[in-house]
Image (cartoon, rainbow, N blue to C red):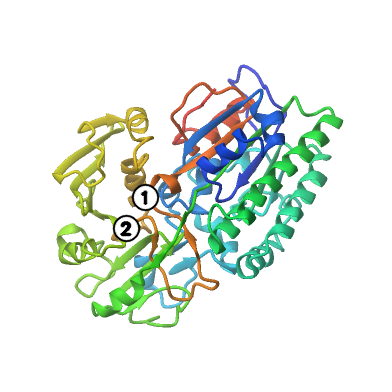
């Protein structure tokens, strides 16, 4: 798959990609400026860059990996969330692995077959790759996925015991052992920040320790590379998939739809309404949810705003709900909040349209037509960075809900079966979930960055031809 045709030069021989799961941009920057991340500062940032990047919607592990591994938004990979429901398959097949999905548990092994192959993964481009604790592994060799048989155990252990120190230490040990073989790519995930943030809160001492543990791992990595004479020709990239905010109240969306008279299908109780469901609620990160509604006795029709108007406005009255998105017609999405209502769409020339119907639901006060770069620049410092594009791309997935909910800060959308109880959440469109730290040992001058830009940037820096139809741009 390696194709260097048409490339001017190859600047780096290999890439180490570090996913700091759940790292907040503001906290990362504070620790860096305060001298608490000395290895990241000295080895990476000093001759490289620290930038703030915008993740994707839903801002949650899994879907937020597609930008870095495939160069595509998750909706365009038909990967709308860590849980989803496929209305067409549900209506046609009583028993099928494609009716619904939750990647919390053993179903993570179905992720590679579920995600559409619009573009090749980094693992398919670089066959000599190593993967550590990442579930999206299409293209990795049999020996390249170093945690293939352990990842479910390690992630369940991390989730339910709240002890992630050993998991991160294991990731470091595998990373250091792998680098001596000089693979083209190592993709490693550190889980501690996310795990402890969920159980405690994003600024807890255990969370801070997890940031520092990653810093120590970076120091060991770079020292190992230096001894091998490989530090200068190794591209080091570190980013997060999402941030988190503390949760003070849980909104039971499943119970809400039950009280409305629906027979709701949801995880983990997949046998409840297994045959008779007329709605489904699929929550990701706990702060966003896909809602699927059976319309006029049929799952074969994708409902629109005019079909769901009463339900949508009822949801909008809930104090926990921040933003409601629903398909208006084949090309448009209607966005509703307590602040107002609008219609948005992406035209054939990749211009975003923002037609306000009633006040300003996102408080953006932007022009009615913008190109993608202009919209990113204007929205980066608002409460909802890149929000219109992210809502649009998510509705491009055939598996997306009829209604997509984004919770207000401090609230989440799931109270049933959350063990242990989550004290922090993510997944929504708010800035503290969408803005993530980006560290790279290469000078980057631009300020308006999406995580989807990393895929073409890595390929460009390693002298590899960039596939057609990627969603990002080269940063250097």
Residue at horizontal 18%, vertical 58%? 305
Residue 257 image point, x, y percent? 29, 74
Label 2 belongs to which residue? 404
Task: Specify the quadrant that holds the C terminus.
Answer: top right
Depth check, mark 2 against mark 1: the one in front is 2
Q: Is residue 287 left or right of residue 21?
A: left
Label 1 belongs to which residue? 394
Nearer to us in this view, 210 or 17: 210
**The residue positioned farthest toward the right in the image shown:** 227
Q: Is residue 232 above or below residue 218?
A: above
Residue 138 image point, x, y percent? 61, 51
Describe the element under mark 1 as helix, strand or loop. Answer: helix
Disc on the earlier residue, 2 or 1: 1
Residue 280 image point, x, y percent? 35, 71
Q: Is residue 251 above or below residue 24?
A: below
Describe the element under mark 2 as helix, strand or loop. Answer: strand
Q: Is residue 190 above or below residue 386?
A: below
Task: Specify the quadrant that holds the N terminus.
Answer: top right
Q: Tell me if I can see residue 120 in this picture.
A: no
């Amino acid at each position: 798959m390696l194709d260097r045709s048409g490339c001017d030069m190859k600047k780096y021989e290999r890439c180490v990609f570090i996913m700091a799961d759940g790292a907040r941009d503001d906290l990362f920057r504070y620790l860096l400026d305060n001298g608490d991340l000395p290895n990241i500062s000295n080895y990476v940032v000093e001759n490289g860059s620290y930038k703030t990047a915008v993740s994707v919607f839903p801002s949650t592990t899994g879907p937020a990996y597609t930008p870095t591994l495939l160069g595509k938004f998750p909706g365009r990979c038909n990967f709308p969330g860590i849980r989803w429901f496929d209305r067409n398959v549900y209506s046609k097949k009583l028993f099928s692995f494609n009716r619904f999905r939750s990647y919390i548990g053993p179903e993570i092994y179905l992720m590679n077959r579920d995600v559409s192959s619009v573009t090749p993964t980094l693992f398919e481009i670089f066959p000599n790759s190593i993967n550590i604790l990442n579930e999206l592994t299409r293209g990795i060799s049999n020996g390249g996925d170093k945690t293939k048989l352990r990842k479910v155990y390690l992630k369940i252990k991390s989730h339910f015991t709240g002890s992630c120190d050993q998991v991160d230490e294991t990731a470091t040990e595998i990373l250091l052992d792998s680098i001596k073989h000089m693979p083209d790519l190592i993709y490693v995930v550190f889980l501690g920040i996310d795990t402890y943030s969920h159980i405690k809160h994003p600024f807890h001492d255990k969370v801070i320790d997890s940031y520092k543990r990653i810093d120590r791992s970076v120091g060991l990595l770079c020292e190992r590379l230096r001894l091998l004479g490989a530090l200068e020709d190794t591209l080091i990239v570190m980013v997060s998939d999402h941030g988190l905010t503390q949760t003070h109240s849980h909104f039971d969306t499943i119970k809400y739809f039950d009280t409305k008279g629906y027979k709701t299908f949801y995880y983990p109780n997949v046998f409840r309404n297994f045959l008779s469901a007329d709605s489904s609620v699929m929550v990701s990160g706990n702060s966003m949810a896909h809602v699927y509604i059976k319309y006029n006795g049929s799952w074969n029709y994708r409902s629109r705003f005019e079909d769901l108007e009463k339900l949508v406005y009822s949801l909008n009255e809930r104090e926990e709900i921040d933003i409601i998105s629903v398909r208006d017609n084949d090309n448009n999405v209607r966005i509703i909040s307590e602040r107002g209502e609008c219609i948005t769409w992406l035209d054939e020339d990749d211009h975003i349209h923002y037609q306000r119907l009633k006040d300003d639901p996102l408080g953006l006060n932007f022009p009615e037509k913008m190109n993608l770069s202009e919209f990113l620049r204007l929205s980066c410092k608002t409460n909802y960075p890149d929000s219109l594009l992210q809502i649009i791309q998510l509705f491009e997935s055939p598996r997306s809900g009829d209604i997509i909910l984004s919770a207000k800060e401090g609230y989440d959308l799931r109270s049933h079966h959350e063990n242990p109880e989550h004290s922090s959440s993510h997944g929504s469109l708010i800035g503290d979930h969408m803005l993530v730290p980006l560290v790279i040992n290469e000078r980057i001058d631009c300020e308006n960055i999406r995580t989807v830009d990393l895929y073409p940037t890595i390929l460009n820096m390693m002298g590899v031809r960039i596939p057609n139809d990627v969603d990002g741009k080269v940063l250097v």
